[in-house]
Structure formats: C-alpha cells, structure tokens
Amino acid sequence: MSLTESLKWRYAVKKYSDKKVSEADINTIIEAINLSASSAGLQPYRVIVVESPKIRKKLGEGAFNPQITEASHLLVFAAIENLSIAHVDEYMQRMAQTRGVPVESLEKFRQLLIANITGKTQEENFTWAAKQAYIGLGTGIAAASELQVDTTPMEGFIPSKFDDILGLKEKGLKSVVLLALGYRDADKDPYAQAAKVRLPMDVFSSSL
C-alpha cells in the first residue's frame, strides 16, 4: 500500500489481540523515529521500548488506557528534562565524527545552539523537547502503518509514575507521550470497521 492508503487503514486501536510484533518490525519503527525530523538535529528525547508484561502491568495499574498492558509493545517517549551545554557538546562530537570534519569547524553552530538553550528557562526547553518527541511519535505511527502494525498514541497517564518505574529520572528524562504497538482484535474492537472521519480536504487545507 502507499503511505496514504496505510494511513487510511490505521486507527487508534482500542482492543489488541495477543499476536506479538516481530523484533525486526520493532527495530524498523524505532529506526524510522530516529530518522525523524528534529530541530537542529539535536534529538532532545529518547524512546524506551517496553515489552515486559510484568513492567507494563505496573505501568497500567489504575490507568485509563488498557492498551498499555494489552498491546504487544509500549513505546515511551521521554524528553530530556534539563538541556545543557553538555548535550550540545555531545552532539557536536557526534556530528564531527559522522561527517569527518574537525569539531572546531562547528563552533559557530555550537554557539548558536548554546545561545538558544541558555536563552530559555528550563521549563521552556523541556516544552520544546517534548514537542520534538511528538514529531517522532507521528513518524512512528506512519512507519508502523506501512508495516501493517497497529498503534494507539496515548496521553492521559501519570508521567511521574512512569518515570519512577522506568528509572527515567536518573537518566535526566521525563515521559511525555506513549505509543502502543500490536495487532487489532477486530472481533472485540467496535471501531475496527468504522469509517475514518476527517475534514474534507477543501476545508482542512487552503492555498494562498
């Protein structure tokens, strides 16, 4: 299927079957997210892949979304809580090594990034980082749909609880959004056969 057809096929699954997503497909989805657009290429978020039923049971206790425990895998998008000059310097080293250029040649770009980070509050930087994670979320949904892997993007969880269970605080991360991965149970999901409802194109988009 084309990307458009794959996106027409997908929906936010409410009931999952017990079929597992292959490791190869999980890796393809994660690679797509890693290649996703990111402001300045800084990638101020990480993705935690949670397959363990035991851990997902803990995460799902008292949660509004049963997909946390019922899906095959759960992706937790976690933004860097406190962006710093050290993050910029790590990025500069990686860029220099990847592109085979002296790190000194990137100093102008480095100073631009540092000025952007230090010119904002910690809260503002975290909000920006979280928005970058949402771009990755969209890429992950599209990549999964091309593989005919079902997804459910989710908020409505308690980030601090997830951070504690997954040990994110020690890594300087805070969870911001979730993505369940698996395969729909068409017999039990009342929305499996429902037509997708979207705005007409001439209402959704306009040209000037």
Image (cartoon, helix red, strand yellow):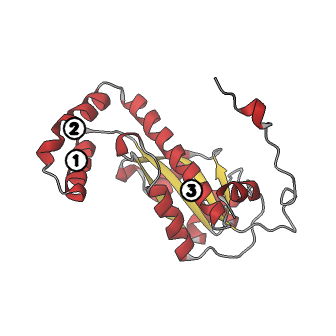
Q: Amino acid at mark 1?
A: Met
Q: Is residue 110 left or right of residue 18?
A: left
Where disc 1 sits, the SS reads helix
Task: Name the residue carrying label 3.
Answer: 140
Give the number of the disc on residue 27. none
In the displayed structure, 143 sits above or below 172; it is below
Task: Name the residue carrying label 2.
Answer: 110
In the displayed structure, 187 sits above or below 80; it is below
Disc 1: CA contacts within 10 A as few (<14), some (14-19) or many (>=20): many
Q: Amino acid at mark 3?
A: Gly
**Of callouts 3 and 1, which one flags the residue occurring earlier in the amino acid sequence?**
1
Residue contact at pointers 1 and 2, CB within 8 angstroms: yes
Residue at 37% across / 31% down in the picture?
122
Q: Is residue 102 left or right of residue 167?
A: left
In the displayed structure, 177 sits above or below 151; it is above
Residue at 71% across / 53% down in the picture?
65
Disc 2: CA contacts within 10 A as few (<14), some (14-19) or many (>=20): some
Where disc 2 sits, the SS reads helix
Q: Position of residue 163 (x, y in %)?
A: 48, 51
Q: Amino acid at mark 2?
A: Arg
Q: How many marks?
A: 3
Quadrant placement of the C terminus:
top right
